[in-house]
Image (tube, grey):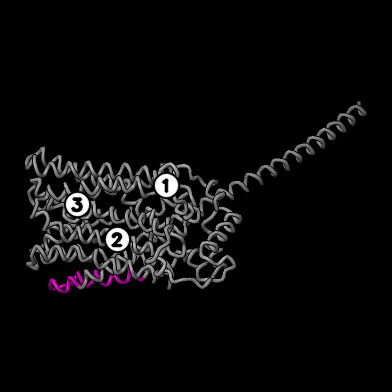
Amino acid sequence: MGMAGVQENGNTETGMGIGMALGAKNKYRRMDFHDEDEDDLLMEKRRKDRRKYVFACSVFASLNSVLLGYDVGVMSGAILFIQEDLKITEVQVEILVGILSIMSLLGSLGGGRTSDAIGRKWTMGLAATVFQSGAIVMTFAPSFQVLMIGRILAGIGIGFGVMIAPVYIAEISPTAARGSLTSFPEIFINLGILLGYVSNYAFSGLPPHANWRIMLAVGILPSVFIAFALCIIPESPRWLVMQNRVEEARSVLLKTNENETEVEERLAEIQLAAGHPSGEKNEEKSVWHEILHPSPVLQRMLITGIGIQSFQQITGIDATVYYSPEIFATAGIDGNSNRLAATVAVGVTKTAFIMIAILLIDKVGRKPLLYVSTIGMTICLFSLGATLSFIGEGSFGIALAVLSVCGNVAFFSVGIGPVCWVLTSEIFPLRFRAQASALGAVGNRVCSGVVAMSFLSVSRAISVGGTFFIFSVISALSVAFVYKCVPETKGKSLEQIEVLFQDEYVLQVSEVELGDVQHLVQKE
């Protein structure tokens, strides 16, 4: 019994020992699994952190675009009260509205060289400072002349900001997310326009001497956030390579890319594109000389970049945005408050549809969105021209006019609005990117200025409806331009996109569709 008991106990102990040993083994095995899981979780966390970091940089870099949007949106309503307060003529109204675009082209032209000299990041800071000084002058302007000085300063600041934000974001973004991130400035322009419209509506009840000044003063606020943003965002890695600061570029790429192998590949690509594989600058012809006397490849890039930027504006989007109260007055909507309320609906539509573009641009691609956009705009512009010319006033005419204007801005926001900035920031080689993007922005601002400065005069000559018929014809031409001159750049690195344009047949659609990444790399 005792022996049995001892044996039993011994067995029990042995059993326990074995059980413990097995338990320990299982525990260690579970810990191994746990370690692997921990590694996976850590990797996923790092990936998410990097995405958040790039997202935050893109948001901060886009804040200057809020200034442009706000200025464009707020002026559509403020001009009604400025006209009443300062007793200015219709021609002066056109000059006041259009001078912003004309002066912003000076900012854009200077922006390319400035951003190559002082960096992408500090060019954004300069843009905000110049705009802010203009906004302050406009707020306290006692006369039309002083108001014009403020408007000129604001225009130059906006020119810098509009040109540099897409370039900076394209240079800092991972390839897979570049399209949607580079569209951020366009989102923020739309957000600014909407805020401008809301500001018009909110302050329209105040006395005419004060309301437009408060509307313009609110535009100073985003500059405060920009000053904060400059303390956080890094410099563009591609600009750092151009300055031969390769280690700094590597540390920025490590924050924005998934792994070290990818970082080294990107760094080698950038150094090659910058024209000094060993990290030393070669003596080459000046960038502007090459842009003004372009090779066939660069010529194709310039036609695509400047062309798409010009079509974005010459199809009349700024006329719709700046003069929507006048358009709604022609359609038969009575009272400033009602017209400004209808204008807010336009702003909401414009901002809502840009979100659709952001979701689709890296999935569907640039070119399909451009087709949908340009064809839709052509139909809406023709419909608006027909409504204002033939249907006239009345509830049906008003509804159709509001629907056509909202449809036009919706199609604009889905495609050509954001895509044109994405394209011009990604199609040019690194050496030319800042200056060539600046030229594209100049084309954009010149067309915007021409439209803004001539819309009222042309409308008086051939009617508002007739003017929109002209816009619809130009919009139809933009469809043909997209078909003939714009390649698909979705999913390709900035360095691979250069190769697209080196093919003589790139402008033919079939070649563009075939040019996947592997094909491009082999061709290199």
Q: Nearer the viewer, mark 2 or mark 3?
A: 2
The picture places residue 228, in percent across and down from the top left corner, at 39, 66
Q: Amino acid at mark 3?
A: Thr
Exactly how many numbered labels are in the figure? 3
Q: Residue at x 53, y 55 (%)?
A: 257
Give how far apart the Cα atoms at labels 1 and 3 are: 29 Å
Circle 2 residue: 443
In the rendered structure, the answer to whether residue 143 lies left or right of residue 499 reads left
Q: Amino acid at mark 1?
A: Glu
Judging depth in this view, the residue of 229 and 413 nearest the camera is 413
What segment carries the magenta color? 126-148
Q: Give the main secondary structure of the magenta stretch.
A: helix
Disc assigned to residue 488: 1
Circle 3 residue: 320
In the rendered structure, the answer to whether residue 235 lies left or right of residue 150 reads right
Of the 4 image quadrants, the one containing the N terminus is top right
Quarter of the image holding residue 109? bottom left
**Badge 1 element:** loop
Judging depth in this view, the residue of 195 and 493 nearest the camera is 493
Judging depth in this view, the residue of 390 and 405 nearest the camera is 390
Q: Amino acid at mark 2?
A: Gly
1 or 3: tag closer to the N-terminus: 3
Q: Is residue 363 above or below residue 225?
A: above
Q: Residue at x 25, y 71 (%)?
A: 153
Give how far apart the Cα atoms at labels 1 and 2 are: 22 Å
1 or 2: tag closer to the N-terminus: 2
**Badge 2 element:** helix
Q: Nearer the viewer, mark 1 or mark 3?
A: 1
Around disc 2, counting alpha carbons within 10 Å, would you say few (fewer than 14), some (14 to 19), or many (20 or more)? many
Q: Is residue 83 magenta?
A: no
In the rendered structure, the answer to whether residue 414 lies left or right of residue 95 reads right
